[in-house]
Amino acid sequence: MSMLWTGMVAAAILCGLATGRGPEVAAAAMEGARAAVDLCLSIAGMLCLWSGVMEVMRRSGLSGQLSRLLRPVLGRLFPEAAGDRRIMDSISANVSANLLGLGNAATPLGIEAAKGLAKKSPGRASDGLCMLIVCNTASIQLIPTTVAAVRSAEGCAAPFDILPAVWLASGLSVCAGILACKLLSRLWRRFL
């Protein structure tokens, strides 16, 4: 990825120099860097707030209750891990963090769950591991904190007015992903 970005920057500089717009390219680069720092700082505040909310939920036991609430559904999605409480706890905590739009908090939990699922089928991606990747990639979000933070940073007066669209889009994407994962899993077993 770094090669791609380096190539794009180099191409922009070369095109700017070739067309005689070197000073404009330099000014745009500085303005872009300033805007990126402003955006990062404004997003950091929102992410700190929601990460704090997640920590309060964890310490109060609310996230554990949400995880327990999700276990029956997740047991059906991950039948090979349903008997392993540690893996199921990691998966439920990961899904809970994704529901709250805390992808940065969900990542370590997802990695822990993936490691546990990978131990069950060393050397290949099991159906459960593929399902975990699909559920993480398409994750249903009840509170899209990162998107709301970006919208707020860009001056949106109502950053959460996108909730119905987010709920619909993320719900449909998770359903499509799970369906595709289940169908491809059955199809793969037929050809083995």
Image (tube, helix red, strand yellow):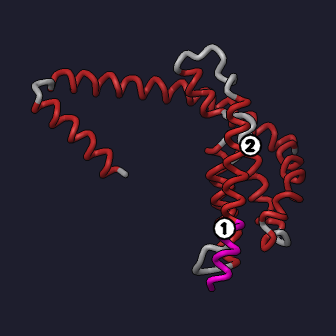
Q: How many C-alpha atoms fall within 10 Å of the one at disc 2: few (<14), some, or many (≥20)?
A: some
Per the picture, the main secondary structure of the magenta-coloured stretch is helix
Q: Residue at x 80, y 44 (%)?
A: 58
Q: Residue 54 carries which label?
A: none
Q: Tell me which amino acid carries mark 1.
A: Leu
As measured in the structure, the alpha-carbon distance from the residue carrying label 2 to the one carrying label 1 is 19 Å
Q: Residue at x 27, y 42 (%)?
A: 8
Q: Say above or below: 103 vs 187.
A: above
Q: What element carries label 1?
A: helix
Residue 93 picture location, percent across and down:
76, 52
The magenta-colored residue range is 182-192
In reply to whether residue 190 is colored magenta, the answer given is yes
Question: Would residue 108 be found to the left or right of residue 84 on screen?
Answer: left
Q: Camera-side residue: 153 or 49? A: 153
Q: Say which residue label 1 marks.
A: 129
Q: Quadrant of residue 17?
A: top left
Q: In which quarter of the image is residue 163?
A: top right
- How many numbered marks are there? 2
Q: Quadrant of residue 122?
A: bottom right
Q: Residue at x 34, y 50 (%)?
A: 2
Question: Would residue 79 be found to the left or right of residue 174 on screen?
Answer: right
The C terminus: image quadrant: bottom right
Q: Say which residue label 2 marks.
A: 99
Residue 80 picture location, percent across and down:
78, 74
Residue 99 picture location, percent across and down:
74, 43
Residue 182 picture location, percent across and down:
71, 66
Q: Tell me which amino acid carries mark 2.
A: Leu
Q: Is mark 2 on a helix, strand or loop?
A: helix
Question: Would residue 85 be found to the left or right of residue 174 on screen?
Answer: right
**Who comes first in sequence, dot 2 or dot 1?**
2
Q: Residue at x 62, y 52 (%)?
A: 137
Q: How many C-alpha atoms fall within 10 Å of the one at disc 1: few (<14), some, or many (≥20)?
A: many
